[in-house]
Image: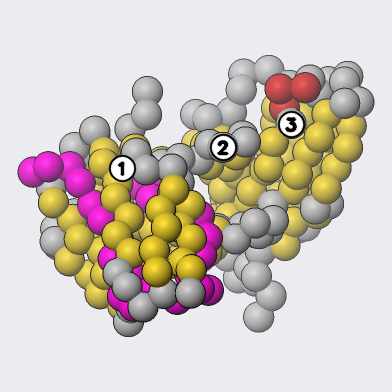
Amino acid sequence: DQQVKQNSPSLSVQEGRISILNCDYTNSMFDYFLWYKKYPAEGPTFLISISSIKDKNEDGRFTVFLNKSAKHLSLHIVPSQPGDSAVYFCAARFLGGYNKLIFGAGTRLAVHP
Amino acid sequence: NAGVMQNPRHLVRRRGQEARLRCSPVKGHSHVYWYRQLPEEGLKFMVYLQKENIIDESGMPKERFSAEFPKEGPSILRIQQVVRGDSAAYFCASSLQGNQETQYFGPGTRLLVL
């Protein structure tokens, strides 16, 4: 039962353009969403998060949008840089759920010059 | 400040042996989480511990797997009688407090069972 879904396994973007990574969820009890970035042979690195009471959160080049009615969130990276090439994981947390994170399968982003 | 440390980074075991994975959280963090990542999949929650207590083990297989986080020393994830299906990357994360706290991940231990 996959409660957090990242339906695009990979995405290729030109340097300087916008990268949009998508994530869908099925459980309306999720109250907090996070994006992590992962390089090969390393652990996930926290990128940005959003509470379910908000619809947008911005941090530098990274913006996360949340559409609760559609159970959909997206991560926008503008402008994309070659160093952004990595696997991006969407994760969600239950209200009152002991901080357990439910991860999507990830999207591999390749930013080419 | 040192981040989350895990050792060993790579571990090779034969079927039937025991695997011990260690995790030292960020200094001052008392909450530890273990996740497992199979190839081409996302991370799957296994267990959440505070010092000397298991808080949530809903993701732990019922047999052969155990975890502890003693008062002193690192957290240990122990897998007894390993099978090939245990081959995966095991990640530890820590947070300063429980709910509403960002988890910081270690580099992982890659377990290969021959």
Q: Is residue A53 left or right of residue B9?
A: left
Question: Disc 2 vs disc 3: which is toward the camera?
Answer: 2
Q: CA distance from mark 2 to mark 3?
A: 13 Å
Is residue A17 in the magenta section? no
Kind of residue at badge 2: Glu
Quadrant in the picture for residue A28: top left
SS of the residue at dot 2? loop
Earlier along the polypeptide chain: callout 2 or callout 3? 2
Q: Report the magenta residues as a range.
A: A69-97
Q: In x, y percent, where is residue B98?
A: 44, 55
Q: How is the image coloured?
A: secondary structure
Q: Which residue is mark 2?
A: B40
Q: Which residue is mark 1?
A: A94
Kind of residue at badge 3: Ser
Viewer-proximal residue, B90 or A98? B90
Is residue A76 in the magenta section? yes
The residue drawn where x is 48% and y is 52% is A108
Q: Is residue B37 left or right of residue A34?
A: right
Viewer-proximal residue, B22 or A15? A15
Q: Which residue is mark 3?
A: B87
